[in-house]
Amino acid sequence: MRTETATTARETGTLAYDLLVVGAALALTLVGTLIWGVGREALATSLGGTLAVVNWLGLRWVVARLLGARPAGGRRRTLLLGTLFVVKFGLLIGIVWALIRWAGLDPLGLALGYSALVVGLLGAGMLVGRERAAGGADA
């Protein structure tokens, strides 16, 4: 039985992470625009940031179901989710390859934008970890 409060608590548990990944993508797009100006490199940075956000949301969704945030519903569903987890990474690599090869975007700009995933998760981990440590039983 699902309740509104259980759903809200689960969503707010990752809300800081979601917001900081999106914020890092926007900030790094601004940095790319300041470094290279408005052009193909800035476009590559913004697309890299978009890929980081989409990858984070997809990763969070799949892993939450794999690790049992919601009941997996049997071995077949677990196998399907595991396959989806692997396919997601292959799709990400394929999209990056296509953006570099066919669209001719700068790999450095894509890397800068995609680093929003790392920057956002580390920043959120520091903020959330600091809040929990200050009010936790270990303090």
Image: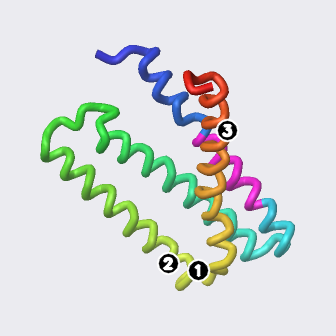
Residue 14 image offset from top left, x and y in percent = 53, 36
Q: Is residue 116 left or right of residue 65?
A: right
Please name the amino acid that badge 2 sits on: Ala
Please name the amino acid that badge 3 sits on: Leu
**Residue at 55 percent of width and 22 percent of height:** 137
Q: Is residue 109 left or right of residue 34?
A: left
Residue 87 image offset from top left, x and y in percent = 32, 63
Residue that numbered label 1 is attached to: 103
Quadrant position of residue 112: bottom right
Q: 10 Å neighbourhood of mark 3: few (<14), some, or many (≥20)?
A: some
Q: Is residue 6 above or below residue 36?
A: above
Please name the amino acid that badge 1 sits on: Ala
Which of these two is toward me, 119 or 102?
119
Residue that numbered label 3 is attached to: 127
Residue at the front extreme of this rendering: 138
Residue that numbered label 2 is attached to: 98
Q: Tags 2 and 1 in contact by the CB under 8 Å rule?
A: yes
Position of the N terminus by quadrant: top left
Q: Is residue 22 above or below residue 52?
A: above
Most common secondary structure along the magenta stretch: helix
Q: Secondary structure at mark 3?
A: helix
Residues drawn in magenta: 17-29
| Mark 2 or mark 3, whichever is nearer to me | 3
| Mark 1 or mark 3, whichever is nearer to me | 3
